[in-house]
Amino acid sequence: MVKRPSFLPWLLLACVAFVGGVTVPGVTTIRKAGDALLRGDVTLTAGSNVTLTQSGQNITIASSGGGGGSAGDEAILSSSVNWSIASGSWSSPLAFNTEERDTNTLHDTTTNNERITIATTGSYIVGAHMYIALSSAGGYGFRICVNGATAAAGCPVQTLSIASASFDVMPHASRPVYLTAGDYLTMSVIHTASGSQTVESIITRFYVTKTGAS
């Protein structure tokens, strides 16, 4: 019995060879369901993300991807120091000197360490989690921008909220974003509480995860 792989069409096999009136086990015809029968020598050709391995009488068909292309590029950034954020305007991009994960050199802990730089074109989940200790009432939030943009259109991930009193707040936001190799992402913070406020590094994270092919 031939078991259909989940990523290939069903192959119909017919064992109908005869020699001297005796049935000889083996495959003599093969076809994709609905197509014409093939006879004689037939070549199996590996497609994208598919490998064929022959050993003895067995041919193993394996898939190395999910049909939508490879995923895997990922960076999760943190910091060993807190950030002090002045009131009333967007901060400069936060610098991250620590990596919890970086699978394809998307970040450098010293050079341009405020950036995650995309290595492979495709779809990504882009997001951040922030912990800010507000000493008074006020608005607060963060944004993630592409290639140094400051206008809303260039900052695909944004969150803004209001605290009615002093409070430790932990906003989180993420969304799918299509990015091109060479694009870079930065994270900035804003608040309107009185005086400078501290973004705590203990929980704050900035991340990207590739989810689909180019």
Image: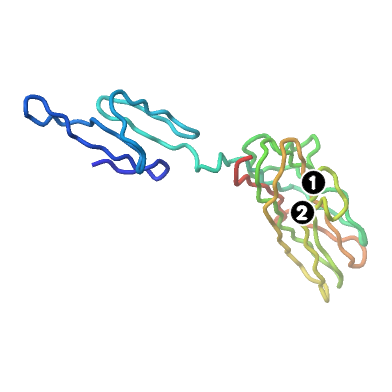
Residue occupying image coordinates x 76% and y 39%: 183
User: What is the secondary structure assignment of the residue under circle 1?
Assistant: strand
How packed mark 2 is, by other alpha carbons closer than 10 Å (few <14, some 14-19, many 20 or more), is some
Q: Is residue 145 left or right of residue 41?
A: right
Looking at the picture, does residue 48 appear above or below residue 82?
above
Q: Disc 2 marks which amino acid?
A: Pro
Query: Residue 72 appears in which quarter of the rendering?
Result: top right
Residue occupying image coordinates x 27% and y 41%: 2
Kindly report the distance in space between the C-alpha atoms of the residues bearing marks 1 and 2: 8 Å
Q: Disc 1 marks which amino acid?
A: Val
Circles 1 and 2, Cβ within 8 Å, touching? The answer is: yes
Image coordinates of residue 193 in percent, x first then y, are: 89, 67
Mark linked to residue 146: 1
User: What is the secondary structure assignment of the residue under circle 2?
Assistant: loop
Image coordinates of residue 10 in percent, x first then y, are: 35, 43
How packed mark 1 is, by other alpha carbons closer than 10 Å (few <14, some 14-19, many 20 or more), is many
Image coordinates of residue 185 in percent, x first then y, are: 77, 45
Q: Image quadrant for the N terminus?
A: top left
Image coordinates of residue 67 in percent, x first then y, are: 51, 42
Tell me the residue that label 2 is attached to.
156
Q: Is residue 199 left or right of residue 51?
A: right
Q: Nearer the viewer, residue 45 or 74?
A: 45
Q: Nearer the viewer, residue 205 or 97?
A: 205
Sequence order check, earlier mark of 1 and 2: 1
